[in-house]
């Protein structure tokens, strides 16, 4: 069976949270037949009512799973690996599976090594989300203009990679990049996990209810992501612990450099650090 | 002369940068006669052409300055103190002056102690700005919905405070708060200066031009203010050094707590910190 996208009309979303729900919403709107596996019937009922899915189940059955050509896992890292371990026999012959997992070294080798040879896992990571969990917050517009990263390994085929690239494209992502799993985890440790750690720590510094009436936009922007799903992010941090610790230590060193320059009244260093940050930030304006 | 706002039809803006220009723009649009002192003729020409001011000068003369009932100083801290020292004799009898300075202990006692007894200085701080400098970036909409802080001392009169409160109000600020100069500097050290330090340090961590294509919104939000006017902020940081160092150390301790919890795999502490940040952040949604 060729892996051209047109052959993948039936897509299964495993895990109907904010991201899984947004995938379902967008793919249904494009005419795909989208099925879903969720833990709670209410989740399926909501998605059915909204038209995000055509059908869904809470039980994982061979009869249901084996109907799908493309399966998207929108689960936490450990739950994803455990699902594949337990149910991979149910997958259709020749199916392609992908994921949305925010860490890659912890899931990609584990899944690819145990996976049946007739099923291909093409790992990907949509760099988008919201500060809310659950299918009620599904909104495929979060993908518009966002980045989508594919992290293939030598186990992947050009056709499989092309299929997932097309998936990212039709979901609305602006930029589709390819990285190794190591480069992904380093980059995500810096750009995403470190920033969440900073936001959490900053928000935890003070009892701050009354501060809302004095704040400008800076504090609001820096702490937006301090509203965080603690179960998901704790798992993501622990599954990328070595990389995240490196990135946190790098930031600690840089922040301390600025602190120490201030302490000794070293204007020159302070200004140099600000000129550098100004220069570098200019590349990030959308 | 009563200090009712209606008597203050002629307003002088000293320093036509982004903030001074925005004050001028808004006050002119409301029908005030706005004059300006700027360092460069081009600045005045731009503001005249845009209708932000009715007239302006590059030289500071008694004849010009003495025409104004209300004077707003939109200068850096040291330049503001130096201006008052040098030119306060030119101020009109009974004039009220205010400022926009982002640090208060460094300017308020110095100015109030040397000021002529017939002129009142009511310190204030508009909590709004942009990542750009100069009158070309003036835009009074940045005040809409923002916070305005008045930091009076025992040298101020109820009428003077009321006048500056009215100024904040007509400029479009949503919330007008009154704080002591000490409470202001502590609060601003935490909410504004610390956040700028974090953004600068984060942006300085890595050569990151290529990272723009992988980033989600988190990094973009956390580093928006890393685009910074290094001369102004270095002066503001140094003029609030003790407070800012305390706030930086508080953040360092909290960030290190999260780092160490991650290092030892302490899920419980990590989740507690995230639950706290989620709870506290909920008060900041606009």
Image (tube, coloured by chain):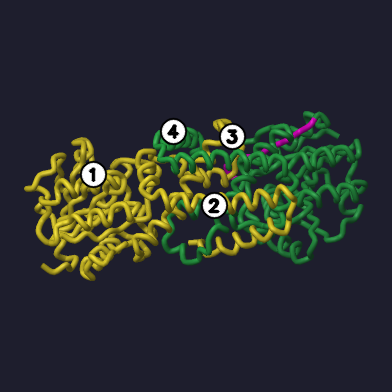
Chain colours: A green, B yellow
Q: How far apart are marks 2 and 4 (CA)?
A: 22 Å
Chain letter of mark 3 equals: B
**What residue do we see at 52% from left, 36% from top?**
B204
Callout 4–callout 3 Cβ contact below 8 Å: no
- Counting from the top left corner in percent of width and height, residue A90 is at 91, 48
Most common SS among magenta residues: loop
Please check whether the numbered discs 4 and 3 fall on a single chain: no
For label 2, the residue is: B251
Q: Distance between the residues labelled 4 and 3?
A: 22 Å
**What residue do we see at 26% from left, 54% from top?**
B99
**Mark 2 secondary-structure assignment:** helix
- Counting from the top left corner in percent of width and height, residue A259 is at 49, 43
Specify few, some or many for label 2: CA neighbours under 10 Å numbering under 14, 14-19, or 20 or more: many
Point out the stretch of residues depicted in magenta. A144-153
Residue B91 counted in the magenta span: no
Q: Distance between the residues labelled 1 and 2?
A: 43 Å
Nearer to us of marks 1 and 4 is 4
- The answer to whether residue B91 is left or right of residue A172 is left
Tell me if residue A29 can be seen: no
Q: What is the number of the mark on residue B211? A: 3
Q: Distance between the residues labelled 2 and 3?
A: 26 Å
Callout 1–callout 2 Cβ contact below 8 Å: no
Chain letter of mark 4 equals: A
């Amino acid at each position: 069976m060729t892996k051209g996208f047109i052959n993948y009309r039936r897509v299964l979303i495993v895990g109907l949270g904010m991201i899984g729900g947004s995938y379902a919403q967008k793919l249904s709107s494009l005419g795909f037949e989208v099925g879903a596996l969720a833990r709670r019937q209410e989740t399926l009922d909501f998605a059915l009512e909204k038209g995000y899915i055509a059908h869904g189940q809470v039980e994982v059955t061979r009869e249901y799973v084996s109907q799908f050509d493309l399966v998207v896992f929108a689960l936490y890292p450990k739950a994803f690996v455990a699902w594949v371990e337990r149910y991979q026999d149910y997958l259709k012959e020749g199916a392609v599976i992908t994921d949305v997992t925010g860490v890659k070294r912890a899931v990609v080798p584990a899944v690819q090594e145990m996976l049946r040879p007739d099923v291909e896992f093409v790992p990907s990571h949509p760099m988008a989300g919201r500060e809310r969990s659950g299918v009620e917050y599904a909104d495929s517009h979060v993908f518009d203009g966002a980045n989508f990263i594919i992290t293939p390994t030598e186990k992947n085929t050009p056709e499989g990679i092309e299929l997932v690239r097309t998936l990212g494209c039709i979901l609305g992502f602006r930029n589709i990049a390819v990285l190794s799993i190591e480069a992904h985890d380093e980059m995500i440790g810096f750009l995403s996990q470190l920033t969440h750690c900073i936001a959490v720590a900053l928000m935890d510094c003070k009892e701050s209810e009354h501060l809302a009436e004095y704040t400008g936009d800076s504090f609001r922007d820096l702490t937006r992501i301090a509203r965080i799903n603690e179960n998901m992010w704790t798992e993501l941090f622990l599954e990328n612990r070595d990389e995240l610790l490196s990135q946190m230590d790098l930031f600690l060193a840089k922040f301390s450099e600025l602190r120490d320059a201030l302490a000794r009244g070293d204007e020159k260093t302070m200004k140099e650090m600000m000129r550098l940050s100004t220069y570098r930030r200019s590349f990030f304006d959308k």
